[in-house]
Amino acid sequence: MRKNTVIEKSGVTNYRAAQDLHQLELRKGILDDVSDLLMHEGTAALSMRRIAQLVGCSTTVLYTMFGNKQGLIDELYLRGFEMVRQTLEAVPRSGAPQNYIYALCYAYRNFALTHSTYYAIMFLKVMPEYTPSEANRQLGQKSFQLLVDAVQDCVTPDSITEDEAWEIARIIWATVHGHIGLELAGHFDYPGVSSQQMLERALQAIVEQLLSTSNRVK
Amino acid sequence: MRKNTVIEKSGVTNYRAAQDLHQLELRKGILDDVSDLLMHEGTAALSMRRIAQLVGCSTTVLYTMFGNKQGLIDELYLRGFEMVRQTLEAVPRSGAPQNYIYALCYAYRNFALTHSTYYAIMFLKVMPEYTPSEANRQLGQKSFQLLVDAVQDCVTPDSITEDEAWEIARIIWATVHGHIGLELAGHFDYPGVSSQQMLERALQAIVEQLLSTSNRVK
DNA sequence: AAAGATGATATAACAGTGTTATGAGAAAAA
DNA sequence: TTTTTCTCATAACACTGTTATATCATCTTT
């Protein structure tokens, strides 16, 4: 951190600000490189020395920029949730509101399967002693706002509070997450019904039961 | 592995067998120690040197006994599933068959929460480059036979094949697993409905929809 | 029984990890 | 200019999994 100087500065071109901006760009560039490394070579490739070599600097720079490895993984954690958010946002909103929920879930599953290394950082504890901060976890949850909205669109307006919608959304999330987890762990690799089909059955059951208006107590 | 000697032996007290038995006991003792270490200090404590020091031998012994660290983790993996099996077996079979399914699931969740380090080895990738062998995964699946039986007991006899029962059991498993995963990751830590209650809602939906006879197409 | 082969095991090394102390060089302030 | 401050590469420390070496006891063979 750059210490504040006693002498006041009021020029139009703020040198410090420009330098800090450059720092931000640099930080973003480094994270892009790390992200590529993660997606192409997996979590095992994410060593501080390897990253330093990749971006062409010493490990010291990384430690001054990110504190420690956890600080760096934290950024990937947030990036992962941001990617989830964008993934969900890209899902077209068409047809019945329930179908939109299904589409969101399938998009989420697709993200998890194609970016499994990211998913592993976010939900599997691939970095043994990394635990995201409470703040970052809450930030991550926001990625599911679209799902919450979709839940609310499924019922008659204002028939449930946002907290209740969040609760249902979390149940749906947990269902998808569970299927993905067992699928990634190889427990769904057997001849017969595909993982996708099993998820469909589960989701239909959950959504039917929790969101069909006939089943809702007013 | 002990090479077979050319000379035949046919004594009553088989020396080799006794020695191998002793080896097996030793192996079991070591695994008991490792298991304790895992439960009391977590996965991070499971280093070969630490284990060697704990049992009072050199690391070489561990490598000749288990091949490598993966071989040792493999044993813990299997132990974990065996613990799951015993946990499910301890659940009293009373009341409606659906309630028995619920009880199995809650017992499973309870196992995951109380033995979270074991659960992490089995389902989270806490050991980055450890992946259980296909054989061990299939062995692990057997721990859920009781759940499959419970599913079959819920429907009219022989109305579903065992494959179909397995499919439904896996869906239930995935649901519970998903809830546990998000709960362990801290995503269910918020004021309001408890994780247990959310799981109850999800399970009721799943079981109602997939197992109620009225919904089943014959 | 003596000599040789075989097996088990402790020590120490190798290559890797996250992290940090050291020191050198550049930039800023005086 | 001199002095202070800051940046950063090098090298070290304490770990990790794994293995080559060497020692020692045991077993086999002569």
Image (tube, coloured by chain):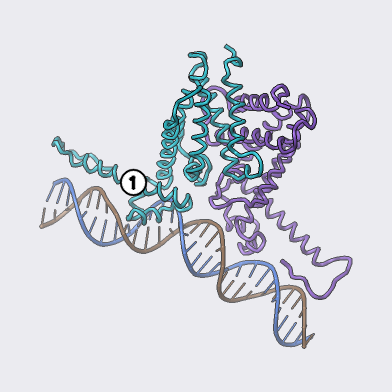
Chain colours: A cyan, B purple, C blue, D brown
The image quarter in which residue B170 lies: top right
Quadrant occupied by the C terminus of chain A: top right
What SS does tag 1 mark?
helix
Q: Residues within 10 Å of mark 1 (few under 14, many from 20)?
A: some
Q: Percent position (x, y) of residue A162?
A: 48, 19
Locate residue A185 relative to residue B95 in the image: left or right: left
Locate residue A138 relative to residue B140 in the image: left or right: left
**Residue placed at 49% from the left, 30% from the top?**
A104
Quadrant occupied by the N terminus of chain A: top left
Tell me the kind of residue under disc 1. Answer: Met
Q: Percent position (x, y) of residue A75?
A: 40, 41
Q: Chain of mark 1?
A: A
Against D10, residue A8 (above or below) is: above
Q: Percent position (x, y) of residue B19?
A: 78, 64
Locate residue A57 relative to residue A5 in the image: left or right: right
Q: Percent position (x, y) of residue A198?
A: 62, 35
Q: Which residue is mark 1?
A: A65
Q: Which residue is the extreme one toward the right?
A: B12
